[in-house]
Image: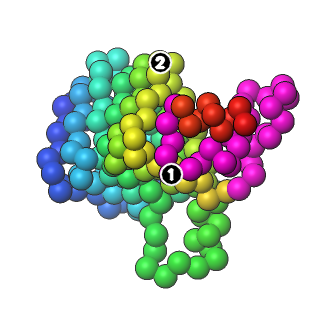
Amino acid sequence: MAFDDLKMSSKSELKLKRTRANFSIHMRRDIALASDSLLDFSMVMGIILNSTDTNTRLDIGNVVYKRGFGIHGKMVKLNGLVKIHRPKKANMIFAQYERKSRIMMKIDQDLELGGKAYIESGHILLQANGTINSEAGFGMKSFINSTCNMDQHGKDLFTCIPHKTLNPVFTHDSYIKSFND
C-alpha cells in the first residue's frame, strides 16, 4: 500500500481489515495524523511504515498493532499511543504475545515524542540519526524485565537505565542525577 499526502482529522480511524502475516505501507509525501486519530493494524501480525525519498515528515496519532510495528522515516513526531491490541479475554497466550511484541523506529533525522505519547511493547528500539526529543508526559512500558546488559563498563552498545530513573518526574536533570547516584 502507498500514500502520497495523507491527512487524518480528529477522531478518524484507518483500519486494515485483511488478515496477513506482514504488511508494508510506503509514504511518498507528508503524513499528518491528528493526535486522537487511530491507525488500527490489529489484524496484521507485523506492519512497517516506510518513507520514500519524497517523504519529509510523519506526524502519528494513536496506533494499535498485533505483534510488530516498525517505522522507517525521516522526521517523525509521535503524538498518541502505540499499543498492542488486547483481546476481550486476555489469557496466557496473550501474555506471550506481549513479551514477544516489537516496536522498532529507525529515523533518519529527528524523532519527537509528544507529551501525550505512550509506547508499550515487549521489545522497544528507538534509533535516530538526529535527536530523540521527549516532551514532559511521554511514557514507555516494556512487558519484559531484565533483558539488557546491566554492566556499565561492558563492551555492549548500550546498557539498561537503572530502575530508579523511572520516577514520575523524568527530566534531563533528574536522569543525570539518578544515573550518577
172 or 114, which lies in front?
172
Q: Is residue 122 above or below residue 51?
A: below
- Farthest-out residue, bottom: 89
Residue 157, quarter of the rendered image: top right
Q: How is the image coloured?
A: rainbow
Residue occupying image coordinates x 51% and y 19%: 129
Between 21 and 99, the residue placed more toward the observer is: 99
Identify the residue under disc 2: 130
The answer to which of marks 1 and 2 sits earlier in the sequence is 2
Question: Can you say which quadrant of the picture contains the C terminus?
Answer: top right
Q: Nearer the viewer, residue 173 or 16?
A: 173
Q: Which mark is residue 168?
A: 1
- Label for residue 124? none
Q: What's the magenta region?
A: 145-172
Residue 142: x percent and y percent?
A: 59, 54
Q: Is residue 152 magenta?
A: yes
